[in-house]
Image: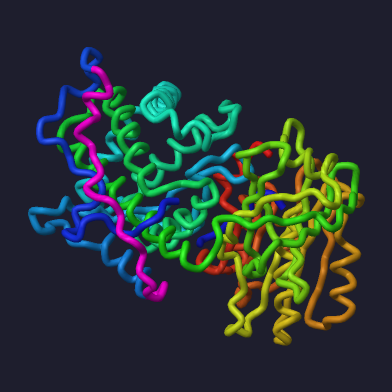
Amino acid sequence: MDAPTTTSAGNGTSGDSDGSGWFTPRTSPSSPGGDKEPEGNRLAALRPMGRPQKASDEPRQNQDSAARQRIQTPADPPPSAPPRPQPGPTAAEPGSEQSVFDARMPVQHVDGAAAASPDAVLIRRTMADIGPVADKVTSYFYALLFVQHPELRSMFPPAMDAQRDRLLKALLTAAEHIDNTPVLVDYLQNLGRGHRKYGTQAEHYPAVGECLIGALSRYAKSSWDDETEAAWVRAYTTISQVMIDAAAADELRSPPWWLAEIVSHELRTPDIAVLTVRPNQPYPFLAGQYTSLETPWWPRIWRHYSFASAPRSDGLLSFHVKAITAGWVSNALVHRARPGDVLRLGPPAGSMTVDHTSAGGLLCLGGGTGIAPIKAIVEDVAEHGRHRPVEVFYGARTGQDLYDLDTLLRLQQSNSWLEVRPVVDRHGLLQLPDAIRDHGPWNEYDAYLSGPPGMIRSGVDALKGAGIPTARIRHDSVEELVAAGD
């Protein structure tokens, strides 16, 4: 399935030992939006504070704690260090032309509006200011990036039409939610690890930061001042450093990508294929997670797909792919790929996984190719031998689109705790929420949703109405699915 998500690069770790980070605010910034001064000179005041050190071999738990502590630094740090804001979740589009800043946005949200930090207030003011001219901000950002740092152009897809707003949108969303520390730390660490597959280096982050500040200061004319710039610098410093640290730690454990040979290509419907691949080295992941995938026909264009099975003893991985109109990668995988072709896989990501310490039931909703991670979760429960009730609602527009129903029914026959309920749409919309309301009760279940955006939205409402707390509902990010073009 394309782009499942829930909560969940350079080399080196922290910068200078004094904790001052990668950027420092300018002492004498020029007038905001000034057109007379060359951008290269105006941005020159934003400089890396030091080269990253070699990552230590400390346990990931210690590194995670250090990252959380760094983000949670009080608002009044020592004079030598700029204040560290408390960041929040970022967003990027799954299944889109993604670059060095692709990842999934966590589904948990923390409402920090009631007690927003001073930096958050300034940043949100900037966001409101640039909203009407977002397209111009984006165009100017990439113009700065590629003119001042032409060496970075090769890290992006050749065609930038769909890519154009991905990187900037991710950065802006991250900065906008700087007060959501509990959500952001794990997300940024996962994002930093994922960036390794692009060949991202620690020194690339300052370049992006310079151009971000340059674009914002040019177009946020009514709200931009020294204080606002300092807030953005602090936010980006924190965000980038957590990502850099995570990438450096991950370099000690995992490759930046895996090569995977297609060993089986099965066309289930005219536009849906099931692919099985063999990685060139062990690929650790959990049922319910996803990966990013690059084909040889579209270099530097990555798409997100869920694993369609639990980890297997033979090490093979399976994906369900639906060809979408004008979808470059999906059409190549469905109609062009054959056994023997070699793909590249990024690291696993996502936390739509099963808590096997719980004995509660699982309510799983899969629409279309969204059944892929649901099937993996069912296999995972079966392998753990826990007889906990699992209810699967499998929705599609037609009976033919229930392409994996036979597999699920075979699982049902061999596992008495599993109930599979196919739901065929008869009115142009998926009717899975109605099916939920016709059964139950579900108040003691953990819920998993995967499928089209409309199904996710209506499914979440139905699940909450059925008494399932929001914290126990895991699903794809609707914002990402709406924006996904492939």
Nearer-the-camera pick, 438 or 368: 368
Q: In which quarter of the image is the C terminus?
A: top right
Residue 101 shown left or right of residue 26 in the figure: right
Q: Main secondary structure of the magenta part?
A: loop
Q: Give the x, y percent position of residue 266.
A: 89, 53
Quadrant of the rendered structure where residue 210 is? Answer: top left
Q: What stretch is highlighted in magenta?
A: 38-61
Q: Does the magenta stretch include residue 40?
A: yes
Q: Give the x, y percent position of residue 247.
A: 44, 58
Nearer-the-camera pick, 424 or 127: 127
Q: In this view, does 217 lie above or below 451?
A: above
Residue 231 shown left or right of residue 200 in the figure: left
In the displayed orientation, state which residue is furthest to the left. 79
Q: Give the x, y percent position of residue 407.
A: 87, 66
- In the rendered image, is residue 5 in sight? yes
**Residue depicted at 19% across the width and 47% down the height:** 118
**Residue depicted at 35% across the width and 45% down the height:** 203
**Residue depicted at 78% across the width and 81% down the height:** 417
Q: Does the magenta stretch include residue 55?
A: yes
Q: In this view, does 245 lie above or below 143?
A: below
